[in-house]
Image: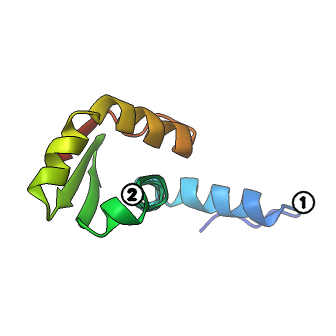
Amino acid sequence: MAKRQNEHLSLADALKEFIVENKLQKGMNKVDVRNAWTSLMGNGVNNYTTSVDLINDTLYVSLSSSVLRQELSLGKSKIIAMLNEELGKEIVKKLVLR
């Protein structure tokens, strides 16, 4: 555990420091990407989305509709750009639709 600091920290700064010290950024990225996918794709796509997993810099999305999978595969680069813009940093470099 880190030394106690006598200076006052905002809650946001304390949480950021906690995440960095405990090496939790990868897990936070997974949660952030899942939330970004849900908010960007909307109900139509989310109804057919069975899982969203971030492994390293590749996003694996499982879909229950082959027609939707084909449609989304045509715009992979745009989806990656939208996700990274929503996240504010480049986390997703490759998208795999299954």
From the image, tell me which residue sits under label 1.
7
Q: Is residue 84 visible?
A: yes
Left or right of residue 19, residue 50 in this image: left
Q: Is residue 58 above or below residue 22?
A: above
In the picture of the structure, the residue carrying the numbered disc 2 is 30
Identify the secondary structure beneath mark 2.
helix
Q: Which mark is residue 97?
A: none
Residue 84: x %, y % from top left: 47, 38
The answer to which of marks 1 and 2 sits earlier in the sequence is: 1
Q: Residue at x 90, y 62 (%)?
A: 8
| Residue drawn at x 30%, y 70% as measured from the top left | 47
What percent of the width, then of the height, locates residue 21?
56, 56
Q: Quadrant of residue 4?
A: bottom right
Residue positioned 54% across, 44% down in the render = 86
Dividing the image into 4 quarters, which one contains the N terminus? bottom right
The one of 80 and 71 positioned closer to us in this rendering: 71
Of tags 1 and 2, the one toward the viewer is: 2
Q: Residues within 10 Å of mark 2 (few under 14, many from 20)?
A: some
Rounded to the nearest whole Å, what is the CA distance between mark 1 and mark 2? 32 Å
Up-down: is 1 above or below 67? below
> Which quadrant holds residue 10?
bottom right
- Residue 87 image offset from top left, x and y in percent: 53, 45
Amino acid carrying label 2: it is: Lys
Three-letter code for the amino acid on which mark 1 is drawn: Glu
54, 14: nearer the viewer: 54
Which of these two is toward me, 35 or 4? 35
Would residue 3 appear left or right of 56 to someone viewing this image? right
- In this rendering, would 96 be left or right of 17? left
| 1 and 2 marks in contact (CB < 8 Å) | no
The image quarter in which residue 73 lies: top left
